[in-house]
Amino acid sequence: MATKVMDIDTIVPVLKLLGDKTRLMILKLIQQKECCVCELVSVLNMSQPAISQHLRRLRDANLVNEERRGKWVYYELNKESNEYPFIDHILKQIPVPYELLKKIDNITIC
């Protein structure tokens, strides 16, 4: 598999986004399964506005996609982005705590 070389001006903003623990955990969780804001609020035990702000920054950087289904908006990793191979490689190095995976699988809010 060929490794894509990324320009430093492209990668620095991505690294800044990944430097935040909450955003990194959001990416890791949506790598496992697409999630809506209410699921992330419940799993990460944070306020809805805080989660939404993190998701906005990730969306603005083209790292996540959103899909509206009725009144819910679901988020997933943007596998078409130029940064995806880099993001995927980093996320594969980070374990998700079992409790969080179990919690997100059991959520039936949405």
Image (tube, rainbow, N blue to C red):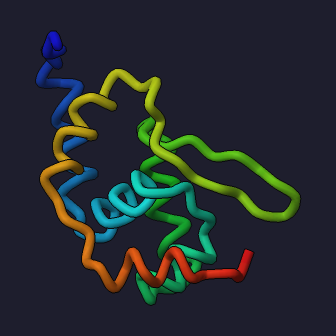
Residue 63, quarter of the rendered image: top left
Q: Position of residue 21 (x, y in %)?
A: 23, 69
What residue is at 74 percent from the left and 74 percent from the top?
110
Q: Position of residue 93 (x, y in %)?
A: 13, 52
Please tell me whether residue 95 is drawn above or below residue 69 in the rendered image. below
Q: Quadrant of the N terminus?
A: top left
Q: Position of residue 80 (x, y in %)?
A: 46, 24
Task: Give the residue furthest to the bottom.
Answer: 45
Please tell me whether residue 65 is drawn above or below residue 24 in the rendered image. above
What residue is at 17 percent from the left and 45 percent from the top?
90
Residue 6, quarter of the rendered image: top left
Task: Give the residue furthest to the top.
Answer: 2
Q: Is residue 67 left or right of residue 57?
A: right
Please tell me whether residue 94 is drawn above or below residue 110 in the rendered image. above
Q: Which of the pair 16/84 is nearer the observer?
A: 84
Task: Give the residue furthest to the right.
Answer: 70
What residue is at 58 percent from the left and 79 percent from the top?
48
